Image (spheres, coloured by chain):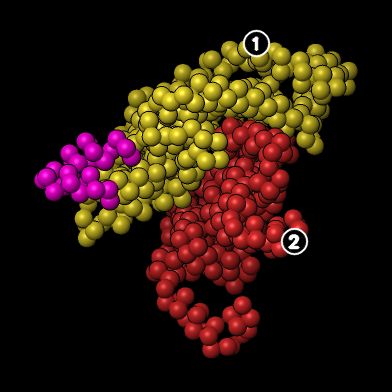
Chain colours: A red, B yellow
Amino acid sequence: MSAVLSPGSGRSAARLAALWASLPLTVLLSFAVLALVVAWSLAPGVFTSHDPASGVPADKLLGPSAQHWFGTDHLGRDLYTRVVHGTASSVASALIAVAIGVLAGGFIGLLAGFLGGRVDTVLARLVDVLLAIPNLLLAVIVVTALGFDTTNAAVATGVSAVALFARVMRAEVIKTRQSTFIEASFLQGGSRWHILIRHVLPNASRSVLSLAVLQFGLSILVIASLAFLGYGDPPPASDWGLLISIGKDYLKWPWLVYAPAFATIATVLSMNRISRWLRRTN
Amino acid sequence: MNRAYPAYACKRLAQAFVVIALTYVFTFVVVSVLPGDPVTNVLRDPQNGFSEAEIQEIVASHGLDRPIPVQLWASLSRFVVGDLGMSMRSDRPVATLIAEVLPSTLVLAGTALFIALVLALVIAYGTQFVPRRYGQGLLRGTPSLFLSVPSFVIGLVLIHAFGFQFGLFQVIEPDSVPATLFAAFALGIPVSAQIAEVLIVNLDNESRQEYAAVARARGLGPARLFARHLLKPSALPVVTVVALTVGELLGGSLITETVFGRTGVGSLVQRSVSTQDLPVLQAVVSLAAVVFVLVNLVADLVYPLLDPRVKLLEPEHRPRAVQA
């Protein structure tokens, strides 16, 4: 293990190079998209010189051009700038949603799988309840109860993902618990905690990671849907979903819909691809 | 049918009822206990101009001043006998409100499911028999693409392309046949992706089997091989997936109906959210869960009858459909 972790050692460099070479082209592309999205959300000012909130009224509803890559909106604001500045909010809310899903769902699944018996039965019904309510409706009632803003929409999206993580975590824990090396560790006097932290969690983490990546993409979609329905922050916020929602009233100028939609689709598609790759390289 | 079936059926049935009751409780708790008091917030809105005494009266008339558990019990016992309560906004029974808009949503969801099945079949057929150099890889990527597009974007693209550019339907007549068809496409496309994904995995498995090789060696063409041999075993798990997508169809109608300006259960939800009409919201969400649970119950009960190979084991060993 230490050989892999120590920086600059020849072996780890070779491994990295091998991993790099084995990456399919589409996965590389997906990582590139992801990197761009992260960069957009961390330092939007680097990528654009326009102001996302104020526009030039004379330049309203211009088509895409060298000056305005994605065109301009009904107030003459540069759409590319709005998309870039909206990234942080879209990405951060998806992260919140995934964090809630992983932590709450993971905890439920861990308890159910590890303790089994009555606890498992009770938690299984809870998960069934969460699964029975259509995802979007569940998110809608939670955001209604919490109040309309983007953070609450993210929390609601996270709640609607809890069941999925709980199920995967439970399945992984049960799978690991039944394996021979757990029995060996137990016979050697390993405590439950030791087994849980040392064996069960690391083994489950791989599946949960690939699901989390997938869910990150899906969360962007659900949050965009909530923003589209008007349950997120109001303008001048520029979440991708909100941008599309504003664009729908100006369908004669279709780039107002297509540009933010393209950013959304490219991001979600990349996350799907990366998740698939992670699952395959297990 | 094997001997374990009646016991399995009873157990699933009991589970379904427990889940439905719990879902009602869960929805109730979310809607009425979480921080923020939507009812009085709306009533206190100065625009509505209610006096404090009037607010108290309204709250009392709906029984909202009683302790939560009492309210829950009253509401649940009414739900069990099919009484969904009164809307807080229109003073009409919730059941009537839902019954008015249900047919429109059923037509939309039914058409969408049909379109999704056909699309999934076409895509799955293509992945088996379109040669690699003619874009098989592209076809294999379509489900993933369909799942990455926000469903409202699909709707907007359809409206822009076919409604505005080609004039195939009138956007201002959302209930006309062509408009319904396009709305159903918007709703059905993401669903088709989920069905196609499962179908493709199964078809890949089946076409590697020896019987498929034998059929090919006998000179069976791709279409007949697909229709007569591969489809049947691959389509069985689709029963489970289709049952799971019911939730998607119900939830998606919220978006699709908003985009296309249709009146339906989705737009009823949208309206009751914006007016904080909680009894309506509670009823629609619970009914959606009831539909989802019942459809999945039927799928689980029918499955062992359709496929005699299925062994009825404990739930964790039962093959579950992959959720996308």
Residue B131 at x, y percent in the picture = 21, 55
Residue A118 at x, y percent in the picture = 71, 36
- Dot 1 amino acid type: Val
Can residue A140 be seen at all in this image of the molecule? no
Pointer 2 chain: A
Q: From the image, give the main secondary structure of the stretch colored magenta.
A: helix
Image: magenta residue range: B208-234
Could you give the CA–CA distance between mark 1 and mark 2, rounded to whole angstroms? 56 Å
Asked whether, in this view, residue B147 is left or right of residue B119, the answer is right
Number of the label disc, if any, that sits on residue B261: none
Number of the label disc, if any, that sits on residue A189: 2
Residue at the location (83% across, 15% down)? B60
Badge 1: how crowded within 10 Å, few (<14), some, or many (20+)?
few
Q: Nearer the viewer, mark 1 or mark 2?
A: 2
User: Front-most of B76 and B282?
Assistant: B76
Pointer 1 chain: B
User: Front-most of B235 and B249?
Assistant: B235
Per the image, the residue denoted by label 1 is B81
User: Front-most of A11 and A173?
Assistant: A173
- Dot 2 amino acid type: Gly
Image position of A249 with respect to A203: above or below: above
Image position of A61 with respect to A23: above or below: above
Asked whether, in this view, residue A152 is left or right of residue A51, the answer is right
Q: Secondary structure at mark 2?
A: loop
Residue A207 at x, y percent in the picture = 56, 56
Q: Secondary structure at mark 1?
A: loop
Can residue A282 be seen at all in this image of the molecule? yes
Residue at the location (40% across, 68% down)? A24
Residue A277 at x, y percent in the picture = 46, 62
Image position of A8 with respect to B91: above or below: below
